[in-house]
Amino acid sequence: MASADLDTRTENDPTSNGERRTRIGWDSSIGATPLGHGWHAEPLVIDWFEPGHPDLLVTAGGGVSERTARVYRRRPAEPGHAPRYDAGELVPGLEGLRSVCVIPNGSASRFDLVGLAQNGLVLLPNKGQGDRPEFNERVELGIAADLGFGPCRVVQIVALDWDGDGLTDLVVGLDDLSGYWPDSDRLPQAQQVGFNQKGGHPGYDRGGLWRGQAPTGRLFWLRNIGQLGAPAFELQPEIGSDADPLDLGLHPAALTVAWGGGGSLELLVTDRRGLVRIYRNFGGQRPPVLMEPRTLQCGHAALQLPDDRTVVVAADLDGDQRVELIYGTSAGRVFSVHSGPTRNDAKTPVELLSESSEIWLAGHAVVTAGDLDADGDLDLVFGDATGRLHLVQDMGTRDDHRYHAPVAIEGGGTPFRVDPGPDGMLDGPLAPRLGYSCPTLADWTGNGRLDLLVSGAGGEILFLRNDGAADSPRFGAPSPLRCDGGPLIIPPRVRPAVADWNASGQADLIALDLQGFLCVFPRTGTHDVGAPVPLVDRLGRYLRLDGGFGQAGRCSLWAGPWTGSGLTDLLVGLPRANRHVIPALTGLPLGDPESLPTVILLENVGHGRVVPRLLRYRDGRPVIIGSEGCSPSGIDGDGQGTLDLLVSGDDGRLHLVPRGDLQW
């Protein structure tokens, strides 16, 4: 795949004015990169363009409507190799949908879609042609978002003929949340998530136990009582075994497969524990009569799916007449699992790749930039939803940045991963253990090498010392920073900044306190900072940068000489939903929220005071990047000593905006 320039002309970017621009893209040696376009990817294999040619439809988090969909066309692949796909194309009409399923319609357009919208289950009639599907209408099916189950979280929906009547039914995996939220009789759910004033979760008691009822995984099916081209669904009894209840953990996903090429369909089930069990179907009946399960093996151990797995589907991707499992992850990636030599075996999961020139890192990517190998260019480190860190090495020049494939970062010789702890799982034990690592590169120790400071969902800040050579970084084991002799806890998912704010000759930490106010934590030692000192505006007012409850934190800070005044300024990246804090910062009335940017400048005017300024493009439009957050940085992209704006959206895309295209 040839390298290509990063396309900075997004929906919010100005058109090019012909000026020479810094280029950024994958290195020409990169043949293919992980397929994806957002977070919480939900794959669906479908003959989109042509019957008999399976393509890949992926819905994922991101965008104004919270979710978008892209269809990826399969590329020719060598036998025995995982299939590759093109760069994909956006599918209009599927915004905001989860659990999208294919329903045959018996017409020239071949299929319709069913999906779960915020207000319930909807049918999307296919108004296109056989080789060009089109979806511009939604028909409500009269089934609420909880599918009639009551308090629950729908994990996945798959379409299949469960009862053998020739019509496509829906099989649903869900988490039953009856009595889960402990204070539902007194407080809305939105006020039962997030940190409390002491950095703990309000849903836990003093012994660390969840105060609500334990959630449970369950399987149901919705029978299609309609007709071909006009489906209608009716809730049926819970799916179980004739002998005993199914052994289900949280986050259950189920589908029918003929694993290993057998002719009889069986029920495949997985859950948060990661094991994959296949229940034998006695006599191949419909609905299935479930017997004892077997656990799929991979090598000499049980097959283990990752703890951030989203949905699981089955299809024959490579045309060998044997189905593979295809699953998505919270970081937005998609994997396939091929069957092994026997009906009890599976091969190691393989990541699906895309031949795309656009740099996509991962869902909920938080990016920090710096020269880690002392060659004068711009290396990247990013964290993802799982809490891991990745190094993306720049193989290009100062004004033509060409990146190598991401490599996982270790801390102390073991793969690094932030654990959220119970306080960082804002939805309680129901939530997956996602650390949401937010890294900052900075010379914290003053030895001339860039160390790592990493925050995450749990509010701790971990220090990873760079013990490597000047041209070869190597990070030590993570250790938490302490504040004034006690634990340092900040709001969740805040990327801290580092600068010599107090002109003391050593780096200070800049972050939010637990009230959400912007503060400087003076450095007192390698692993210690002093009590927070609030920054203020010209009127002496504190600066609150986060929202409340579930929207706490989630901002990214960068410190550097943005205005060229000789003082250290701050750039702040905000989620779209937290832009309501901006009027309080600027003192201006709130008009249209969409007129406010997600990136703001706090100009340092000295004496611990900053002036909030809104970043806009030259034509006056606000800089709006990301949905649930973005991470801005000032970078000397062309080596000329002036700073441009590099922003990573939470959908994993990089945006490089030349300084000349901005105003504030």
Image (tube, rainbow, N blue to C red):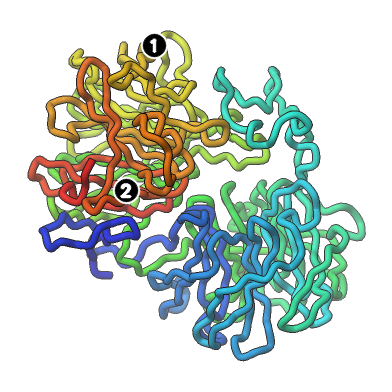
Left or right: where 620 falls relative to 462: left
In the rendered image, residue 31, in percent from the top left (x then y), is placed at 31, 67
Relative to 578, does residue 507 appear above or below in the rendering? Answer: above
Q: Nearer the viewer, residue 165 or 479?
A: 165
The residue that disc 1 covers is: 531
Label 1 to label 2: alpha-carbon separation = 34 Å
| Residue shown at the point (22%, 25%) measured from the top left | 604
* Whether residue 261 is visible: yes
Q: Report the number of discs.
A: 2
* Identity, as a three-letter code, of the amino acid under mark 1: Ala
Is residue 272 shown left or right of residue 440?
right
Give the farthest residue toward the left: 640
Q: Which mark is residue 518?
A: none
Estimate how packed mark 1 is, as few (under 14), some (14 to 19) or many (20 or more) residues with alpha carbons within 10 Å. some
Q: Secondary structure at mark 1?
A: loop
- Horizontal and vertical percent position of residue 276: 68, 57
As drawn, the residue found furthest toward the bottom would be 108
Quarter in which the C terminus is drawn: top left
> In the displayed structure, would residue 415 be above or below residue 136?
above
> Which residue is found at the position 64% from the left and 55% from the top?
118
Residue drawn at (31%, 29%) of the image: 497
Sequence-first disc among 1 and 2? 1
Mark 2 neighbour density, 10 Å: few (under 14) some (14–19) many (20 or more):
many
Give percent across and percent down for residue 451. Answer: 28, 30
Answer above or below: position of 352 versus 225.
Answer: above
As drawn, the residue found furthest toward the right would be 243
Mark 2: amino acid: Val
* Residue of label 2: 623
SS at mark 2 in the image: loop
